[in-house]
Image (tube, grey):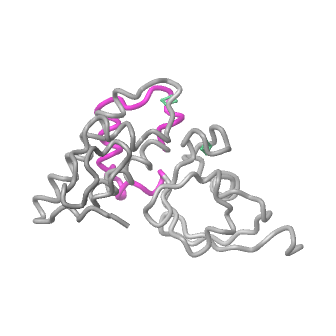
Amino acid sequence: MDPTKSSAISLRVNGERHSLTVDNRTTLLDALREHLDLTGTKKGCDQGQCGACTVLLDGRRANSCLQLAVATEGREVTTVEGIADGERLHPVQQAFLDFDGYQCGYCTSGQICSAVAVIEEHAAGWPSAATADVRPEAGPSPLDDDEIRERMSGNLCRCGAYVSIVRAVAEAAAVREAADSAAGGSRGERVTA
Ligand code: FES
Ligand code: FES
């Protein structure tokens, strides 16, 4: 192995550790698809434009086509294959099924990973460009359709299933909020830094 061209790395994906040797230029997307056979993550544009390749890195969404695999060591990678809890679908996955949030399905894994993170970002009080009042004292704004469209705007759908996608994200967010309330939890303070 020429260390100037390739590296032996260890990736933690969906809770499992994988050892692999990759060309140093290999993206996380290609490492997932070509080395680990995790083909749920899709390649659309391969240049950060479409969101089809969205995965979670330490719980935050990232375009895996823009991330080098060698730079992902030590991070927790979650792909659409790791979103469900065993046989139980994640509420976002269930909502996409219930509200027909897809047509061909090519963008769907990226949409689902993104939506999972969007709901957590909103629950943590993170404002978006669509948030009318970003002052901390204004408190959390509702995750309405404008907020969802803005926060999901990095994920394109060539089939134009956006109306159903927005409904699915809203439903999954409501499920999360209800579970949070039942558990006696509260929404996080708005993040200002
Ligand atoms: S394939 Fe990564 S953003 Fe399009
Ligand atoms: S469902 Fe076909 S690209 Fe989104």
| Camera-nearest residue between 139 and 58 | 139
| Camera-nearest residue between 187 and 79 | 187
Q: Position of residue 111 (x, y in %)?
A: 45, 42
Q: Position of residue 141 (x, y in %)?
A: 22, 48
Q: Quadrant of residue 28?
A: bottom right
Residue 31 falls within the magenta-colored stretch: no
User: Which residue is rendered at x = 17% and y = 56% of the image?
Assistant: 179
Q: Position of residue 150 (x, y in %)?
A: 39, 40
What stretch of residues is rendered in magenta?
A: 80-109
User: Which residue is rendered at x = 13% and y = 64% of the image?
Assistant: 183
| 137 on left or right of 4 | left
**Figure check: 35 above or below 50:** below
**Figure check: 67 above or below 160:** below
Q: Quadrant of residue 186?
A: bottom left
**Figure check: 85 above or below 151:** below
| 185 on left or right of 13 | left
